[in-house]
Image (cartoon, rainbow, N blue to C red):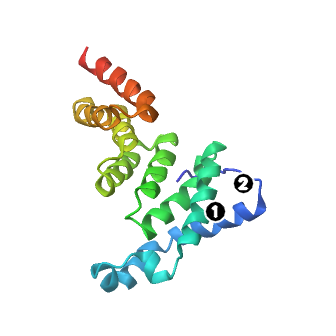
Amino acid sequence: MNSTYIHPPANPEVAGIVTQLAEGLQHIEQIIEESREYLDQGYTLGELRGITDEGYAALYKVAHELCDQGEFQHALPIAFQLTLHQPTDSRYSFITGACLQRLKQFDSAALMYALSLDVDPEHAAAAYRLAECLIAIGKPEEAKPFLHKAIDLSYGDFDKRTLMEMAQKKLDELLR
C-alpha cells in the first residue's frame, strides 16, 4: 500500500476493522508458513482460523461499502484478507483487484482478476477488468483475448449488455 498518510474511515468500528486487518497482513507470511502443512492438504486459511460464512459476509459488506464510498485504500486490506482466507470465492479476488485497479496498481490488479477468472471462468467482469489492466501496463495484445471472452460471456444476457458494449468498444479501439 501507499506510504503517505491516508485518513482513517469515519466510522470508528470500520476504522478498527481496517487497522486490525492491515496489521494482520504484516504477519501473513509467518501465518502461511506455520499453516503450510494444512494448506498443502487443501484447507483454506479461513477454515484453519475458523472463519464462518457470516464472518466472510460481514467483512465483504464492509469492503463493498468502502468501495462504494471511493475508499479503496481502506477496502483493500479487508478484500485482500478475504482473498487470502477464502481463495475459492471469486468475489473476494475480484474486489481486491478492483481496489488495486482504482489505486493504479495495475500489475497486482491483473493478478487478482486472473485469480478471479481461475476460480470462476464465467466471470465476464473479471475478464473485462483484466483486459483493462493489461492495456494500462502496455500489453494490449494480451488484453484482446480477455475482451473477446468478456463479450462472449455477456452475449445474450441483458444485465451484461453494458459490459459487452464497453468490451466491444475497447476491442475496436485496439484493432484500429
Count how many numbered circles sit on residues in the image.
Answer: 2
For the C terminus, which image quadrant?
top left
User: What residue is shown with label 1?
Assistant: 18
Q: Residue 77: horizontal and vertical position, in percent? A: 55, 60
Left or right placement of residue 144 versus residue 31 in this view: left
Q: Residue at x 29, y 50 (%)?
A: 121
Position in image of residue 63 (x %, y %)? 59, 55
Asked if marks 2 and 1 touch (Cβ < 8 Å), the reply is yes
Circle 2 crowding by C-alpha within 10 Å: few under 14, some 14–19, many from 20 = some
- The reply, left or right, for residue 120 in relation to residue 158 is left
Q: To which quarter of the image does residue 130 belong? A: top left
Image location of residue 140, percent across then percent down: 27, 29
Q: Is residue 173 above or below residue 74?
A: above
Q: Secondary structure at mark 2?
A: loop
Amino acid tagged 2: Pro
Marked residue nearer the N-terminal end (2 or 1): 2
Residue at point 39%, 65% (across, down): 87
Q: Secondary structure at mark 1?
A: helix
* Direction from residue 128 to residue 8 in the image, left or right: right
Q: Residue at x 77, y 53 (%)?
A: 10
Dot 1: few (<14), some (14–19), or many (≥20) neighbours within 10 Å? many
At horizontal 67% and vertical 44% (from top left) the residue drawn is 69
* Amino acid type, callout 1: Val
User: Would you name the residue on which mark 2 appears?
Assistant: 9
Which residue is more in the foreground, 155 or 11?
Answer: 155
